[in-house]
Amino acid sequence: MAVGKSAIGQQLAQQLGARFVDTDAVIVAGHGSIADIFAGRGEHAFREIEARTVADAVEEAEGTPTVISLGGGAVLDSGTQQLISRCIVVYLECDAETVVDRIARNSGRPLLAGDAMGRWTAMFATRRPVYERLADITLDVRHGSVPELGGRLEAALRNRAAAKQEVEK
Ligand SMILES: Nc1ncnc2c1ncn2[C@@H]1O[C@H](COP(=O)(O)OP(=O)(O)OP(=O)(O)O)[C@@H](O)[C@H]1O
Ligand SMILES: O=C(O)C1=C[C@@H](O)[C@@H](O)[C@H](O)C1
Ligand SMILES: [Mg+2]
């Protein structure tokens, strides 16, 4: 959480002239704030809505260049893991030190309520192997501005495409 998925995703989409979909934003538009969903209906209900929202986003992206920014817990769902295997999955690799100021002014992230730093660190430790397993591209986002990181990500995508083309020759 707070590693820059939304900001860098939007930046990349702008650079590529692609559509941008932020699944958290789609959920909020359709169901109200994430904090309210967690408080009123619980995390399980949120995860069901999230899985459906991601599935719709991936389906709608078929044939249209699209950057989809997911919520930090979306890829824990096994159905979502299967679904995104047809996408290029980018893991934004970060650390607690980088996000500390961002989560200190935490708003709207119910899973970070209370000890935001402790919760972020504990969740990252359990999620990290999943992120690493699913990633096609890993981008270190500990240093650099959003536009710089967007540039680095675009370069990584182009390198990957070129390497794939070379293999398929
Ligand atoms: N490289 C960066 N340099 C400076 N600020 C950044 C950088 N990346 C993100 N930010 C800022 O940090 C905050 C959190 O970023 P963002 O909302 O994109 O994270 P996220 O991974 O989408 O979080 P969430 O899991 O809550 O959706 C935003 O205010 C964003 O502008
Ligand atoms: O990491 C998570 O589990 C979450 C991250 C946010 O993007 C939101 O999807 C929600 O707050 C849950
Ligand atoms: Mg986000």
Image (cartoon, rainbow, N blue to C red):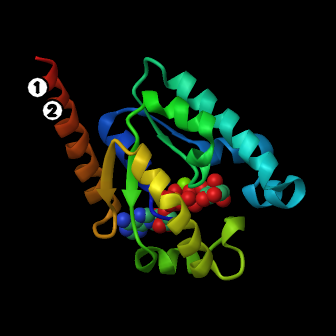
The answer to whether residue 28 is left or right of residue 62 is: right
Q: Report the residue marked by disc 2.
A: 163
| Residue that mark 1 sits on | 166
Please state the quadrant of the image where ligand 3 appears: bottom right
| Lateral position of residue 158 relative to residue 49, left or right | left
The residue depicted at 51 percent of the width and 68 percent of the height is 125
Q: Quick one: SS at disc 2?
A: helix
Horizontally, residue 15 falls left or right of residue 46, namely left
Q: How crowded is mark 1: few (under 14 residues within 10 Å), some or many (20 or more)?
A: few
The answer to which of 110 and 44 lies nearer the viewer is 44
Query: What residue is shown at x 43% (from left), y 44% (from top)?
Result: 134
Badge 1 element: helix
Which quadrant, please, contains the C terminus? top left
Residue in the foreground of this view, choosing between 102 and 96:
96
The CA distance from mark 1 to mark 2 is: 5 Å
Q: Residue at x 56, y 23 (%)?
A: 59
Mark 1: C-beta under 8 Å from nearest atom of ligand 1: no
Residues tagged 1 and 2 counted as in contact (Cβ below 8 A): yes
Q: What residue type is labelled 2?
A: Ala
**Residue 160: where, in percent of width, then height?**
21, 36
Image coords of residue 138 (percent x, y): 32, 52
